[in-house]
Amino acid sequence: MGSSLDKAIANTIEKSLDIYDYELTIPLTNFIFQSPLHWNVMTIIALATFKDDFETSFQHLCASISSKTGSKSSIQSIIEIGIARGFIEKKALKRDKRIKSLRLTHKSKKDYSNWIAADAKTYYPIIKPGRKNK
């Protein structure tokens, strides 16, 4: 007979499979899950969107993401497609107009927030405070 932790893990796996179907219905998460590089690019851009003292640019992404994960031209392509699909917006930095800051658009920020909230509900039972992991 499995432990309570085993049961919680099995339940979490089932929920994560269910949420994956949901994630594929959202254009933003469908885009994010195309490859590990897409996930890295979009996660760093999301951090720049949600964190006040953090910004990112093409140059920053290239420096932050391992060349084993993807090339500079692939990063640029993901940014361009993300802009064309309305997921990413590009603005000149106030301190240096030559550098373009990358952020999620208003709609993508909302979709990303909803996705993270749904994901948190999926994994909360297994990581909730006070749980004894044996």
Image: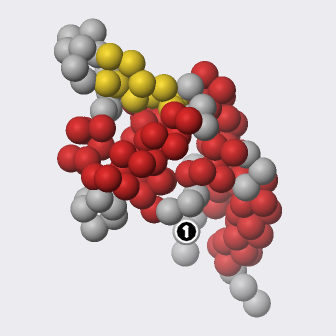
Residue found farthest to the top: 94
Other residues around mark 1 within 10 Å, as few (<14) / some (14–19) / many (≥20): few
Is residue 20 something one can see in this rendering? Answer: yes
Q: Position of residue 84 (x, y in %)?
A: 56, 35
Per the image, the residue denoted by label 1 is 133
In the image, residue 127 above or below residue 27: below
4 on left or right of 18? left
Q: Look at 29% across and 16% down and name the residue there.
A: 93
- Tell me the SS state at disc 1: loop
Q: Quadrant of residue 108?
A: top right
Q: Look at 50% across and 62% down and name the residue there.
A: 35
Q: Position of residue 64 (x, y in %)?
A: 25, 48
55 on left or right of 83? left
91 on left or right of 21? left
Quarter of the figure that contains the C terminus: bottom right
In the image, residue 58 above or below residue 104: below
Q: Look at 74% across and 67% down and name the residue there.
A: 17
Q: Look at 23% across and 38% down and name the residue there.
A: 59
Q: Nearer the viewer, residue 100 or 119?
A: 100
Quarter of the figure that contains the N terminus: bottom right
115 on left or right of 75? right
Q: Position of residue 119 (x, y in %)?
A: 66, 50
Q: Position of residue 52 (x, y in %)?
A: 38, 19
Q: Nearer the viewer, residue 47 or 12?
A: 47
Is residue 128 something one can see in this rendering? Answer: no
In the image, residue 98 above or below residue 79: above
Residue found farthest to the bottom: 1
Amino acid type, residue under disc 1 in the picture: Asn
